Image: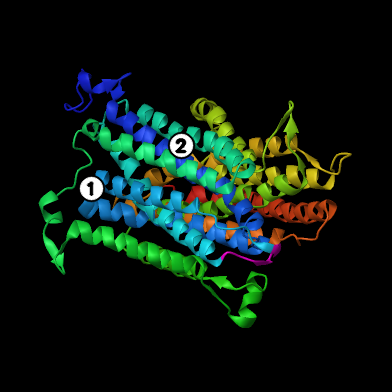
Amino acid sequence: MSTAAPALSGQDEFLGHPKGLYVCFLTEMWERFAFYGMKALLFLYLTKHHLFSDTDGYLLLGTYAGLAYALPLLGGILADKYLGMRKAVVYGGILLVLGQLGMAYTGHAASGIQGDGQQDGFAVQVMYAALALIAVGVGFLKPNISTIVGRLYADKDPRRDSGFTIFYMGINIGAFISSLIVAYIGEKIGWGYGFGLAGVMMALGLVQFVLGRKHLLGKADPADAAALRVPVFAGLNREWLIYLSGLVLAAVVWLVLQTRIDFGPLSSLVGGHEVTLTELVAVVLGAAVYIWFIRLMFSGISPAEKGRMIMLMVLITVSALFWGLYEQTYGPWVAMADRAMDRTTFGIEWTAGQTTAFGALFVIAFSPLFAWLWPRLDKVRLNPSYPGKFAWALVLCGLAFAVLAYAAANPGSSGMVSLWWMVLAYAVLVLGEMALSPVGLSAVTSLSIPRAVGMMMGAWFLFSAFGEIIAGRMGTWAQVPPEASMAEALAVYGSVFTKMMWIGLAAGVLLFLLTPLLKRLTREG
């Protein structure tokens, strides 16, 4: 007997899964195509077209990505309470298309030297507005497209895990092909053409989502459609009020992206640079999460539950550091690939942005391996605990930086680093990702007490956003003066990557040492 939901009849299935899965698959694939394609180009575009300094480029990259990963918390809440997932995805998709097409307007290239050039002020403001629209669009689309996939299956449908595996493959396919295509077009033909292609493909993904809405079987509709149509303010109904509020939020994000605050002597804590408004908000939100957590510890839960929650909070905190290191791939890794790397192999010259495709490629290659590995290790009682897996992730992350630090210190006869060092570094880094990213989601649902699962899942994604912000700040260490020679640039990258290597290794070793204690905290009695 099938355990699928009754509504999922055979006539609405394809290859054993609801047709709605493939609608969501294509939507997510093209959204990630647009997001990662643009992200692969962003630092290069900022520093080579608008002549941002390396520091300003890294900070904007981290600020933008951090907001894009934090706003899904709000988008998910609005969809759950009011809009429904389908309307939220469509609205988010529209904002994404507008943002990506806005990025296609590049104005004229800045003149002068990097960090002190005469910029096209209007084009720069258009770019900030486009980034704001993309960040808010991701906030509405990203959490809700995943929720729709889950709703297409009954609670105990054995196809659910397989369906999510297919869905998440779309993420990596989109990231892989966009890094190859969008990055190439942007760097070789024109920045605007690369960004524009990302917008066009997002538009196609949105169109197929709208056309395929019947395959969602009503699972993504608003809980109370009538309530959305009731006027609530100045004659506006709740639905349009939410849409207008999304545009107001985009205006706020536009301001946040370019706002920094000088705290004088306190700025020395971040290398003497001004603090971004996003970093201040992140500190406040992080403090609020810890305060909530401490209060939860005194809310009458059992010692074993406290132990599991403490372990989970440690893992969530550690994840921010991991992502802070991992996301250097879109900053200093790309910068080194652009400025000091021989990117020719098998007679093909890769662009700097195209090197980001290696990450998605290794995720696709390693996912089946790790899906096979964990159950096999468990059978022979060698499966690492959650803290053990996170510790390995940090160590592997540190070793990935060790590869590039060695490469920077030992360039070839041409004075450049071989592309193969970058390939090896990505392979090691993604091994670490496999031990942390999918495992982390499992840890949240397994370790959290039932009444706090939603909050802890929110904290997991929020700390991923913190990781992006940390990445931007850490990236500023890799500032290279515009007049620097290739050898001087490699010296900077080698030094910074060595520091990041030690951060990853030290954090991993510390977590290995803490693992026995964390495991004891979770024991009953």
* x and y percentages locating residue 53 in the rendered image: 67, 63
Task: Inspect the magenta stretch and tell me whether residue 223 lies in it.
Answer: no
Task: Inspect the magenta stretch and tell me whether residue 114 lies in it.
Answer: yes
The reply, left or right, for residue 233 in relation to residue 173 is: left
* x and y percentages locating residue 473 in the rendered image: 61, 62
Quadrant position of residue 208:
top left
Identify the residue at image location x=63%, y=44%: 187
Q: Is residue 306 visible?
A: no
10 Å neighbourhood of mark 1: few (<14), some, or many (≥20)? Answer: many
* x and y percentages locating residue 388 in the rendered image: 56, 43
For numbered disc 1, what is the local secondary structure?
Answer: loop
Q: Residue extending furthest front?
A: 108
Q: Which residue is tagged 2?
A: 171
Q: Give the answer, above or below, for where 366 lies relative to 83.
A: above
**Magenta-highlighted residues:** 112-120
Q: Give the answer, above or below, for where 396 lies relative to 472.
A: above
The reply, left or right, for residue 149 in relation to residue 120 is: left
